[in-house]
Image (cartoon, grey):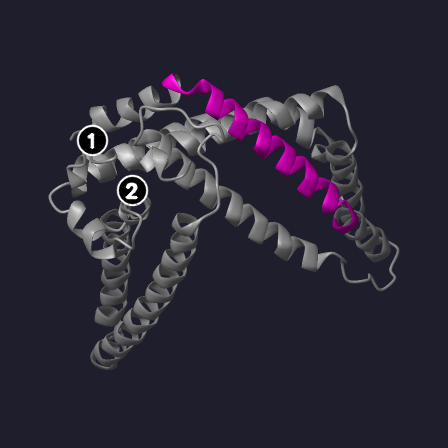
Amino acid sequence: MNIGELLGGGFRVLAKRPKELIIWSIIQLVFGGAVFAIMMPFFASIMAAQRAAAAGTAPALPSGLGMIFLFELLLMLWFLMLFAAVVRMTASDGNDRWAWLRFGMDEIRLIGLGLLLIIAMIVVEIVAVLLGGVVVGLVTAGSAAAGGILAVVLIILGICAAIWASVRISLIAAITVLDHEFAIRKGWRATKGHFWTLFGTYVVMFIGYMIVEGIAVAVMSPFLFSSLVGARSPDQAIEAQQRMMATLTTPSVGLIIFWVVGSLVGTALIAYYHAVNATAAIAATGHSRADLAGLESAFE
């Protein structure tokens, strides 16, 4: 397993299954459009609050906060189902009439796994901050300069530890889908000896994503942010923001192209990351296609 094999494996998985990618992109487009329509009242209340503030009256609190919470839950569910679908597709040479999408025990296990990892992360972070604070406080009592240097060193070490832990747990979710059971210990062991390969792969993908995002911002900036140019006062800034909001909420050819292309590219990037992750999980665990042959039939 090396960086080239993982990156190339992700490309090959998606190149062989363009139909699934198109289906996922369409779902993403429809889902995004529906959520956007649901959130329109929230955008309208924000614009009304801005106008009220500019007029010197007390602005009302934006409505629709409950819908935003619902949006977050639906978005999490969709991306979770997409992740599991890409893992299944990567592990199989066959086809699936539902584009590998479903909601079953694998997805429920992923929800439980995510909650468990979040809780563990919070606990570790709290313990680390408390211990670090005590140590820095004791050192600072003797020397303020030494305490400051130690604080910087601990922060750097904390960032390095977080990166190391993130890479070590990065295959747990994919292996959980592959094995149809929680695979925390197995996923942790699977990354042993492959840290730098996985870390390098993730760095390369991150750089690629940043390049794509930079291109997208450069292309869309004149369309989205031209109204903000030339704003010289708070009132003008508010008016410019409202014009930009109107641009984003008024159907137009440019907006439709933005939604379609954005959905296709965004879904492709997300699916590619998941395909690389699944390829790494299969390679790191020593799974063969024969081992995974039952994965496809298990969901028919």
Res 274 visible: no
| Dot label at residue 178 | 2
Which amino acid is tagged 2? Leu
Task: Indicate whether 196 appears above or below 107.
Answer: above
Displayed quadrant of residue 112: bottom left
Let me know if residue 85 appears in the view. yes
Q: Is residue 275 above or below residue 194?
A: above
Q: Calculate the distance from the C-alpha at mark 1 to the C-alpha at mark 2.
A: 13 Å
| Residue 259 sits above or below residue 127 on the image | above
Looking at the image, how many numbered discs can be counted on the residues? 2
Q: Residue at x 40, y 39 (%)?
A: 299
Q: Position of residue 36 (x, y in %)?
A: 69, 41
Task: Name the mark nearer the viewer: 1 or 2.
Answer: 1
Mark 2 residue crowding within 10 angstroms, few (<14) / some (14–19) / many (20+) = many
Residue 296: percent from the left, percent from the top? 35, 33
Residue that carries the numbered disc 1 in the rendered image: 290
Q: Which badge, 1 or 2, comes first in the chain's sequence? A: 2
Location of residue 243 in the rendering, given as x and y in whole percent from the top left corner: 79, 36
Left or right of residue 267, residue 178 in this image: left
Q: Which x, y percent locates residue 94?
A: 35, 24
In terms of depth relative to the viewer, which is nearer, 266 or 230? Answer: 266
Three-letter code for the amino acid on which mark 1 is drawn = Ala
- The reply to whether the magenta stretch includes residue 148 is no
Q: Are marks 1 and 2 in contact (CB under 8 Å)?
A: no
Q: Residue furthest left?
A: 193
Q: Quadrant of the N terminus?
A: top left
Instruction: Give the residue drawn at x 42%, y 36%.
Output: 300
The quadrant in which residue 222 appears is top right
The residues colored magenta run: 16-42
Q: Secondary structure at mark 1?
A: loop
Residue at disc 2, secondary structure: helix
- Residue at image point 56% right, 46% down: 75
